[in-house]
Image: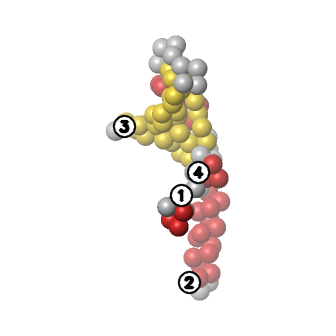
Amino acid sequence: MSDEPGFAAILENMVADEAPRLFAIVQEYGERVDGRIAAWGIAFDDGHAEIVARGVQGRLRAPEDALRFFNLGSHIRARLVWFNPDAATPPEDDEAA
């Protein structure tokens, strides 16, 4: 049996090891003219995914299965984009303002 900090560390490791991957379904307008996030999703180790889009949620066999719901005509294509925390725009430096 562990003490509280040791047990908290075990739980933290378990969560980190089993965390699902976050992704977005992005709709691209035209040929790289514009884009918007149409849905967010999480992918689990067993391969299935859950998505949420403006009050709609669903379960899919794989993240890529969501793309067909967000392709619209020939000018709006859906793209799966995996979340990369290193790609986030850094917050503005308060002292530079």
Q: Using the image, tell me which numbered label, if any, was put on residue 91.
A: 1
Q: Is residue 9 left or right of residue 41?
A: right
Q: Nearer the viewer, residue 43 or 92?
A: 92
**What residue occupies the far top of the structure in this picture?**
74
Q: What's the residue type where badge 3 is placed?
A: Arg
Q: CA distance from mark 4 to mark 1?
A: 9 Å
Dot placed on the residue nearer the N-terminal end, 2 or 1? 2
Which tag is nearer the camera, tag 2 or tag 1?
A: 1
Q: Quadrant of residue 78?
A: top right
Dot placed on the residue nearer the N-terminal end, 2 or 4? 2
Q: CA distance from mark 2 to mark 4?
A: 34 Å
Tags 1 and 3 in contact by the CB under 8 Å rule? no
Quadrant (top left, top right, bottom left, bottom right) of the N terminus: bottom right
Vertical position of residue 45 compared to residue 97: above or below: above
- Which residue is denoted by mark 3 in the rendering? 54
Vertical position of residue 65 compared to residue 47: above or below: above
Q: Neighbour class for label 2 at 10 Å: few (<14), some, many (≥20)?
A: few
Q: Is residue 81 left or right of residue 75?
A: right
Q: CA distance from mark 2 to mark 1?
A: 35 Å
Q: Secondary structure at mark 4?
A: loop
**What residue occupies the far left of the structure in this picture?**
55
Where is residue 50? Give x, y as percent: 49, 41
Dot placed on the residue nearer the N-terminal end, 3 or 4? 3
